Image: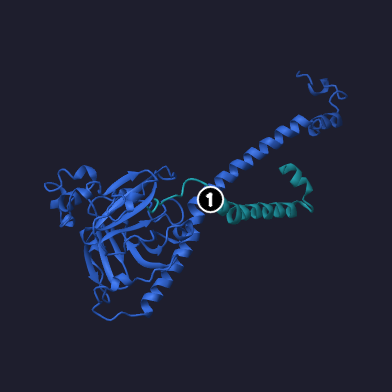
Chain colours: A blue, B cyan
């Protein structure tokens, strides 16, 4: 026969009430325990706040900037639509862009970034301006002019217009649209391409008419190549002739350059990524006309 | 801290959950629209310009 095991328990010892009290009410927290818990909770909270800041920086600022960019573009389209310019545009006309700080005056397209990549460029490069979109350095040349048309843009958050600037290679088109004209700039040969340019890439179709500036315009342009990474203090990259400090060559001897600046590496402001391009083509604006360069992929 | 807040939320359980959600959303909104926009320019990852001369 199997013995009845249950009956061997001492019912008094396993008193239900006594047992429950032991399990459900821990001893009251001492000051040490309370402090450790508070510090732990604060640390977890701090971690969550930092994570939230990343979300803000990378996504929320994008949303805010997208709204501002849209407003700026709408205002620009309205301005372009309202005061029509007599055709053919007078050759000096593009000099008279309506430059107001924080307002858009031109549009930039980089066809290799895809057909939906386009931004309105605002005048000015303060934080407030760059929140709206790429900003034109006040006082630098205007699109199509001799000198250096310099534009800054964010690389992370705030619409990140210049996120992929490091992916541009030589001869990629950068198209700038103003009220009356289209300007096509092309990224200059990279530093390591300069030596073999004539035998190498110069023969490919989009590179027609592009040569390292040092070979066509002389030594003053020897440092002006397609891409460079510089210290944040090197303002000379946006000089009319890049890297020339102080006295510049006369205006008519200056190339028609465009310079884009953004931060480098991403998520850091340790350096600046600089892209130089030279104007190769311009078209007057006509209804329904889109420069063929816009279709380059 | 969180335990203290939870114990001091009034009402039955479902109401306390609703109150807790509102509190969390309020704090997130405060961070997103007031604290972060204020703190951001002071942090070093969005300087994209070079000095103009």
**Disc 1: host chain:** B
Q: Quadrant of residue A32?
A: top right
Q: Position of residue B52 (x, y in %)?
A: 38, 54
Residue closest to the eye, A193 or A47:
A193
Q: Position of residue A213 (x, y in %)?
A: 19, 51
Residue drawn 42% across and 58% down?
A: A125
Residue closest to the eye, A18 or A159:
A159
Residue drawn 75% across and 34% down?
A: A34
> Which residue is outermost to the left?
A199
> Which residue is outermost to the right?
A12
Residue drawn 46% across and 68% down?
A: A71
Q: Which residue is mark 1?
A: B40
Is A146 displayed left or right of A30 in the figure? left
Quarter placement of the N terminus of chain B: top right
Is A262 displayed left or right of A280 in the figure? right
Mark 1, secondary structure of its residue: helix
Is A183 displayed left or right of A11 in the figure? left
Q: Quadrant of residue A268?
A: top left
């Amino acid at each position: 026969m199997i013995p009845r095991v249950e009956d061997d328990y001492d019912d008094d010892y396993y008193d239900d009430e006594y047992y429950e009290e032991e399990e459900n009410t821990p001893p009251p927290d001492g000051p040490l325990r309370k402090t450790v818990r508070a510090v732990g909770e604060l640390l977890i909270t701090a971690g969550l706040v930092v994570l939230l800041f990343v979300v803000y920086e990378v996504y929320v600022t994008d949303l805010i900037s997208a709204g501002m960019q849209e407003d700026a573009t709408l205002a620009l389209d309205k301005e372009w639509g309202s005061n029509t310019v007599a055709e053919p545009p007078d050759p000096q006309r593009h000099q008279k862009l309506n430059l107001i700080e924080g307002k858009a005056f031109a549009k930039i397209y980089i066809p290799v970034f895809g057909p939906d990549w386009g931004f309105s460029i605002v005048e000015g490069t303060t934080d407030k301006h760059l929140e709206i979109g790429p900003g034109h350095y006040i006082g630098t040349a205007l699109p199509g002019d001799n000198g250096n048309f310099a534009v800054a843009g964010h690389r992370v958050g705030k619409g990140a217009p210049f996120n992929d600037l490091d992916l541009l290679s030589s001869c990629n088109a950068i198209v700038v649209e103003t009220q009356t004209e289209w300007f096509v700039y092309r990224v200059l040969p990279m530093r390591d391409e300069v030596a073999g340019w004539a035998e190498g890439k110069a023969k490919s179709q989009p590179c027609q008419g592009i040569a390292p500036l040092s070979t066509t315009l002389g030594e003053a342009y020897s440092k002006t190549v397609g891409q460079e990474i510089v210290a944040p203090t090197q303002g000379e990259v946006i000089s009319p002739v890049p890297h020339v400090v102080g006295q510049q060559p006369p205006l008519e001897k200056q190339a028609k350059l465009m310079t884009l600046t953004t931060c480098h590496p991403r998520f850091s402001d340790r350096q600046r990524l600089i892209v130089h391009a030279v104007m190769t083509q311009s078209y007057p604006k006509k209804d329904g006309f889109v420069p063929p360069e816009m279709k380059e992929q | 801290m969180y335990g203290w807040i939870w114990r001091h939320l009034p009402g039955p359980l479902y109401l306390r959950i609703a109150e807790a959600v509102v509190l969390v959303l309020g704090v997130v909104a405060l961070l997103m629209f007031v604290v972060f926009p204020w703190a951001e320019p002071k942090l070093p990852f969005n300087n994209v310009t070079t000095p103009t001369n």
